[in-house]
Image: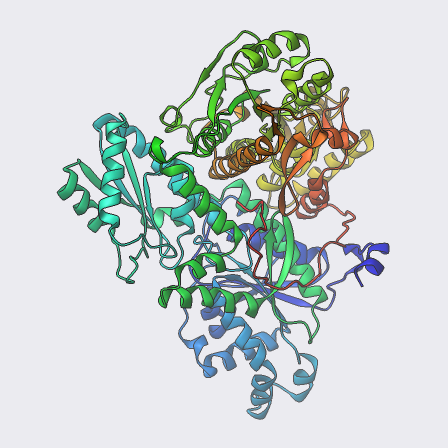
Amino acid sequence: SRSAMDHQPKFFENLSGAGKAIAVLTSGGDAQGMNAAVRAVVRMGIYVNAKVYFIYEGYQGMVDGGDNIVEVSWESVSSILQVGGTVIGSARCKSFRTREGRLQAACNLVRRGITNLCVIGGDGSLTGANLFREEWSGLLEELAQKGKIDAEAVKKYAYLNIVGMVGSIDNDFCGTDMTIGTDSALHRIIEVVDAIMTTAQSHQRTFVLEVMGRHCGYLALVSALACGADWVFIPEYPPEEGWEDSMCVKLSENRARKKRLNIIIVAEGAIDCHNKPITSEKVKDLVVQRLGFDTRVTILGHVQRGGTPSAFDRILASRMGVEAVLALLEATPDTPACVVSLSGNQAVRLPLMECVQMTQEVQKAMDEGRFLEAVRLRGRSFENNLNTYKLLSHKKPDSELPKSNFNVAVLNVGAPAAGMNAAVRAAVRVGITEGHKIFAVIDGFEGFARGKIKEISWGDVGGWTGQGGSILGTKRTLPAKYLEKIADQMRTNNINALMVIGGFEAYLGLLELSAAREKYDEFCVPMVMVPATVSNNVPGSDFSIGADTALNTITDTCDRIKQSASGTKRRVFIIETMGGYCGYLANMGALAAGADAAYIFEEQFDIRELQANVEHLTEKMKTSIQRGLVLRNENCNENYTTDFIYQLYSEEGKGVFDCRKNVLGHMQQGGAPSPFDRNFGTKISAKAMQWISKKLKETYRKGKVFANTDDSVCLLGMRRRNLVFQPVAELKSETDFVHRIPKEQWWLKLRPLMKILAKYKTSYDVSDSGQLEHVAMLPKEAETGAI
């Protein structure tokens, strides 16, 4: 069936919502990004000519009716993208749990002709929605019998369609890689941990941090990974008997190694293997009694739910909101209620009840003490996180480490990108665990040629995850002009493998080194590249380390600029972003900041388009939203420069709006890495080092390593849903070397999304969406790019 569909792409312009009414509600605990989802549902709904309603205060508002259910317009959702929580309110509702309450709710919906519901909430809210749908026809018959609605209405509104989106900071819902709000909650936690580290460092303190997660340890686990915590307690993976001793030994060992601080992270639902709670106070008392360390407890509480949503959550929620409307337009009485979610970076639809059942299975496994099963049911992303954490946090005594007698060099190449240091740390520690000696190269290929290379130990990379930029130092220089000297250094230091963390130059560098293999045997060793650049322009990977941090910087700045423009009224800002010829930052920044347009190199534009954008903004100034935001990639067009566009807009907008411009510049390369970049850098780099170990074993013959096939020079990238090793030689055909970008880029598919949400008529190919998948128990070896 799939191939038949492939021949005829499905375009969303052909789907109409005319005559349909969609209502959107948020329910359960709030989460950052819910507003972005609400905004996307409203605008997409109006775009396809459906009527869209807000239901205020969750299910309570549905039961109470009246002015809790209102039709909304395009402008109703303006300026909410950057607001945390939910602007339409959420309430715990007892009456909806009764049939009486649901009867009243059905009556309120039918009277307004609403038969399409979009529910944004946790698993409880979604289960409630499903029950409501199953009872719907019975409820209508009862209402008709009581004379509340006529028989005509029973026929006309016979079916209720439901699509769910999961908004929950705990990321506790099976079937979705990331729930809306999780990434933002991690941002809050990491900001706090970074701040606490400086004070703990000053006083040689131990800090016990309690994070949210009554039944799910995701936040605790990922924040422990992202800040290199000494110990973490989560409900899915209780510590073994006698953990008190091993934890104290670990803490005192770290102090002996001159580590001035200890951080212990506790999920609020943490338990021991007898299902007894482990509280942060208990952990603190233990450390004080056994070790006498100066120890403090910090409970983060509702800070984690607050604040502005991260760029990731805004894009996730916007994509989900649009997908939810598509799912409602295509729903039939026979399709099960579904949730829209993300797998890797693909939008998928899953049957709601399958996800709920799987989520309940995890809880059951935990209650019954089947903890390994619980971790497996959480999904491969959770399992990966746990395994990586275990790998990186505890150094085995030297006597227990294998001795491989291999030397591996690690270097950074290209421009600095936040998360590079997390990648170096993971590479060093995994390498040491695998028994190799790890050498750090200072200042890229240039430093390599000059012999700036030294062995690096486990302790040397402590505390690196949270540091921005590149501690090793990085240069854009390519190796071609230093081949002789680099080969000398590799021979002198007996380097058996190379790991390069960097951007497009790192990719070019590996191509040059593999071409030089004919002349120099020294380069006949396994080499791997991990993509790290803010531009996200490396072929073979959908994401690169550093792009998420840059995107957050752009989004934060745009938020402030929008605020300034709103205050002044009738002002349009033109903002120039980095990225070389790659429009990723401009396009995704525009989506996350709610911009009116983004000019990028990949999509040619001419003076007519610029004119159309000016007219669009002129129309917008007549509404209640009197401000505009336009992003421009630095190299999108050599003649239509930022100044040119600024002057054109200023002239054409005379008397209607005035214009300002802002070049963001190098602030996009700096700053502390976001949780996503820390985590992505850590996991992808650990995997790359494991690949090196495997290749070293395969290519070791007669006392030396000799590797000269294409598959021994690889780039590790994330493709759709998987992390894959690809020979750089095979990526050549996918690369536009003149403009230093991949020929095909996945995010261009999201370009229409930005235009739709900014009220432009556009064509949108939705062939990819609409396949209802099933929640699979994934096989052990499946690796995901899920972070």
Residue 573 can be seen, yes or no:
no
Residue 434 vs residue 627, the one in the foreground: 434
Left or right, 30 with respect to 230, comes to right
Q: Among all residues in the image, which is located at the extreme bottom? A: 145
Where 126 sits versus 295, above or below? below
Left or right, 412 with respect to 641, comes to left
Coloring scheme used: rainbow
Left or right, 266 with respect to 548, comes to left
Q: Would you identify the image quadrant in which residue 602 lies?
A: top right
Q: Position of residue 414 (x, y in %)?
A: 60, 20
Q: Position of residue 182 (x, y in %)?
A: 47, 49
Residue 297 vs residue 477, the one in the foreground: 477
Where 689 sits versus 86, above or below? above
Residue 290 vs residue 344, the one in the foreground: 290
Quadrant of the frame with the N terminus: bottom right
Where 22 sits versus 168, above or below? below
The number of numbered badges drawn on the structure is: 0
- Residue drawn 45% across the image and 15% down it: 454
Q: Would you identify the image quadrant in which residue 312 lies?
A: top right
Q: Position of residue 663 (x, y in %)?
A: 59, 22
- Residue drawn 59% across the image and 56% down it: 341
- Residue drawn 39% across the image and 36% down it: 227
